[in-house]
Image (cartoon, rainbow, N blue to C red):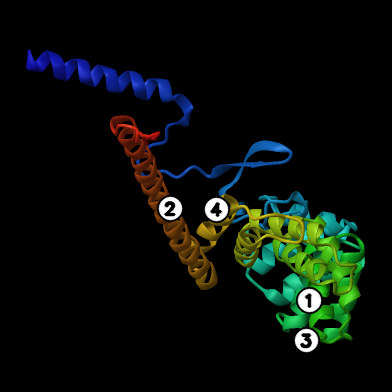
Amino acid sequence: MRTHRITRALALLAMLASAAGCNATRTGEVSPTIRICDTSGCSERDRATASFVPDDSGKSPLLQDPDRYAGESAQDLRAAAENGSAAAADKLGQMHLYGLGGTPKSAARAAGWFRSAADAGHPWAQYRLGQMLADGRGVTADRRRSLELMEAAAAQGHPLAAHHLGLLAQGGKGVPADAATAARWFAVAAEGGVADAQYNLGLLLHRGQGVERDLYQGLQWMRRAAENGNLQAQTAVGRLYLTGLDTMGQDVAEAETWLGIAAGRGDAAAKSLLAQLRKQREKDEDFRRKLMLLQAETERAWASAVLASWLTAPRIDYVVVW
């Protein structure tokens, strides 16, 4: 009986191995290809081409380079770049910046390819090269040229470049401090999905700095920033709902939600506000319980008084006539 069970198990394993077909490999073998999927679909490519796909991240599609490296052959990209393809040059820059697809990691080579793409007007290459020039990474630091590239990228609607320019204008770093210029660039970045820019724009609208004061729009941008994960915005939105704003009344449930999120992420101000909110709510609930007890006692007292009046004989005054 035991031999029969073993035989059946071996047969089942053989069937599974047969069903796996060409997907199976011999023990110790590594397939020379790997399946890469991108916007153009899926295909089998040389395993050496795929190790990491850079993601200039965020939830918004505008925060992702449409020409992200996706496992293409370096030789094919080089041929295309030499033929004038800015997208191919941008991808080669990414390959060298991160050491992808078997290419040597080299910031200097990356900067060279980004420069080719930037000169052709590629906004992501302009932004990346602008960052490298600002930091002196792979190139000699050049703040003036970095600023020119950031402005060129932001003028095409690049959200991260716009946010960078907004910060410079807000802090007066390398450019004159100008709240109106900061608000203009933050607006571009906020529309593009940069959470920090949404928070900063919300602050400027709330304070009326560089823009006309608009508390409602300020709250809307703050809330979008909070929903996109900005910790400061989550605390700020919680505080605004807790205290109320202009004509907006309090919303304790919303306040507790946002303060709870921020407190869970370690924000000290949110923890303090949340503790105060819950302490006050406990006091309010205790007060309400006392009122309910007092109400019950009052009802019992009134009931007793009425009952006593029913049980007590009415007073009769006699008038004697002489």
* Helix, strand or loop for disc 2: helix
* Residue 2 left/right relative to 136: left
Residue contact at pointers 4 and 2, CB within 8 angstroms: no
Mark seen at residue 141: 3
Q: Nearer the viewer, mark 2 or mark 3?
A: 2
Q: Nearer the viewer, mark 3 or mark 4?
A: 4
Mark seen at residue 167: 1
Q: Position of residue 171 (x, y in %)?
A: 79, 83
Q: Mark 2 belongs to which amino acid?
A: Glu
Mark 4 to mark 1 CA distance (whole Å): 30 Å
Mark seen at residue 285: 2
Residue at image point 54% right, 72% down:
269
- Mark 3 and mark 4 lie on one chain; the one further toward the N terminus is 3
* Residue 293 left/right relative to 202: left
Q: Nearer the viewer, mark 2 or mark 1?
A: 2
17 is higher (above) or lower (below) than 226: above
Q: Which residue is mark 4?
A: 257
Q: Quadrant of residue 52?
A: bottom right
Quadrant into which the N terminus falls: top left
